[in-house]
Amino acid sequence: MSPGRSFVSKMLVKSKVETLRSEGNSLAILGEAEEAVLGRLAAAFDPLATDIVFVSGSRMEGLGNSTSDFDLYVVQSEKYTGDPFVTVVLDAQYAVYEIFSLAHATRVATTLNAIDRNDYRQIASLSLFELEFYYRVLIGRALTSHHSFEQLRDSFRRSTIDECVATWCGLRSVVLLGEARQKLALCREAGAYVAAQQAAAAALDSFLAAHGQSYPGFKWRFEKLLRIVPKTSPDFKRAWDIKSLGRRDVSQYLDAVAEFCRDMGMQAFESWSLNDVMCRQAKTAQAIVVNGQCFIVENKTTLFELDEASSKLWQWIATPTRRGDLLDRAEQEQVMTALEVDEVLFDLAMHGLLRQGSV
């Protein structure tokens, strides 16, 4: 931080809003030219001369409307302190500021540009946060420090984000479809339905990215699909129909989703599977043993009891472990069957005790 630098607090932004209102100026885009609104929104953050402020999000893609919020990003040349996320309202116009360091922006670009698209483990380990940030910089428009922003954006490429998102979503679709099948085998129909529904959405997102229509926020997937096929087309209707269960039972819905995923090209990712998901203990969960009985304390507030077999599984995931390796070890040591392993893993995940790191 530079001497005298202060992060713009909500109190300071509010005082600026009151000043703007007292001047009688409307910040709604229907009342002023959007360029003027954006200028005021950038100034409201009170940036340093070296800060890069840019606008991104749905408005930059022609997907928003007059009531959509403004997504503003601030990239600081030094490491910032304070809240990285601030939401303000300026005369009924919503603005969301996210603050990053230049080092973070550079690291994200370098990481994604260098990644091997054929290395599924690398791709699966990417976070949605990284993918989305890369995309937001790429489609952004500078409000301050225009030259510095152009220099930054030169490191971001459209082909890179499309390929990464297409693969990331494809891997996610394969894993979720496998999860849906396992949950159905365990008669967990509600969980199977949700996993299948998510698998279909991920397959569509992968298809869209492969056709140059990625949107890592995944909010506008059907608006993006309309850029590829008309609303009256069978492809659009089918994608819309697969959004929910409809009149099908869960087994029929899962079959329909599996067919949809194949038609979206997800067979390209079938060398990846649910077995490749990395399982690990949640950071907030700790094991205690009382009179030989294992319990898990979650976030110091909730207690879970584990039987002997589940306790062994819990010990195995003290370090990140592939689901496939857990199944093999359980079989070799005759601790539990594959379905019983999944029963335990699904229960641990449901209670927030298990983290799955590959998707």
Image (cartoon, grey):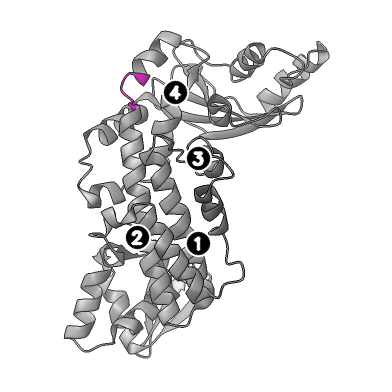
Q: Are marks 4 and 3 in contact (CB under 8 Å)?
A: no
Whole-percent x, y for residue 43 in the image: 61, 14
Q: Position of residue 53 (x, y in %)?
A: 50, 19
Identify which residue is drawn at 66% across, 32% down: 68
Q: What secondary structure is marked by label 2?
A: helix
Q: Which mark is residue 174?
A: 2
Q: Amino acid at mark 1?
A: Gln
Instruction: Write down the region rendered in magenta.
Output: 153-157
123 sits to left or right of 83: left
Secondary structure mostly seen in magenta is: loop
- Gap in angstroms between the C-alphas marked 4 and 1: 36 Å
> How many residues crowd around disc 4 within 10 Å: few (fewer than 14), some, or many (20 or more)?
many
Residue under label 1, please give it: 197
Residue at the disc numbered 3: 229
4 or 1: tag closer to the N-terminus: 4
The answer for how far apart the CA atoms under marks 4 and 3 are is 37 Å
Q: Amino acid at mark 4?
A: Val
Q: Position of residue 222 (x, y in %)?
A: 55, 44
Q: Amino acid at mark 2?
A: Val
